[in-house]
Image: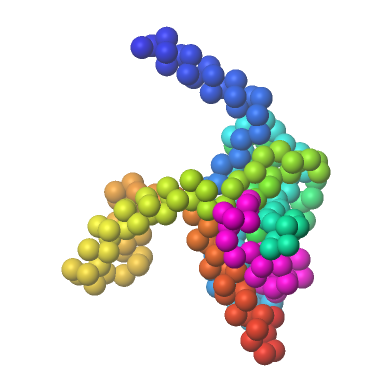
Amino acid sequence: MISAGALLLTWSEVRRNNRAIIRVLDCTYCGTSSRWENSGRPFLEFRITVQNHGISLNDLSVGLKFRDKRGGTNWVPLARLDTPTLVHGEFARGMVGAFGWKSYQSNAQPPNLLPGLEDFRKQSAKFVISAGGYSATDIPIAGWRDRAAKFWNRFVALPAQAWQRQIGTTPSVLKMIGSWLNVRLQPDCGSSLGYFIKELGLLSSAPGSR
């Protein structure tokens, strides 16, 4: 039993030392505002936070790749959100980076592209992680990980919803209850991106909006 555990640990370490392994820590969509951004007007933000669990990568970038209805390939780059001015640098094991779009930024004006993404699975939608201009790994959208995350998130929400119906507690209390139970929601990129695309389409069609 001990030798099997040692072999598994060795295999895991060898894999980490020889492969690009990127884990999604969080994937969110929200409407927000800031006095320092977009002239204080509300805007939409999509954010994916990743952590390196494998070999070191340099000049990390993330892009959304998917097929359109005519069979062509669309590519939409994501902006670096945590350190926007950092273009070159090492993304070593354990480091965390955030990428995404803000609706008011010119590089996030996918009203012309993202609304064409209607079925993540049929259009083979995925986030492609690149290092130094070369593809390192990818994160499929609405794959088995997203489906498992959706199931888990619905399951762990049941006790909190029952509690809320009983005592009418607030979302902040629900979050505190979740931390007491050591329950962590899993990132569901498919749902977050779907909501972002839907709201972005509504925003772009509104007169005088940006």
- Looking at the rendered image, the quarter that the N terminus falls into is top left
Most distant residue in the left direction: 166
Identify which residue is drawn at 68% across, 56% down.
Answer: 66
Identify which residue is drawn at 30% across, 50% down.
Answer: 180
Near-viewer residue (205 or 14) = 205
Identify which residue is drawn at 49% across, 54% down.
Answer: 188
Residue 20 located left or right of residue 180? right
Q: Where is residue 170 in the image (x, y as percent from the top left)?
A: 31, 70
Q: Where is residue 152 in the image (x, y as percent from the top left)?
A: 37, 50
Segment tinted magenta in the rendering: 101-126
Q: Where is residue 121 in the image (x, y as percent from the top left)?
A: 57, 54
Near-viewer residue (11 or 102) = 11
- On whether residue 102 falls in the magenta region, the answer is yes
Relative to 114, residue 204 above or below: below
- Looking at the rendered image, the quarter that the C terminus falls into is bottom right
Image coloring type: rainbow
Q: Tell me, yes or no, if residue 83 can be seen here.
A: no
Q: Position of residue 115 (x, y in %)?
A: 65, 70
- On whether residue 3 falls in the magenta region, the answer is no
Relative to 29, residue 136 above or below: above
Relative to 135, residue 48 above or below: below
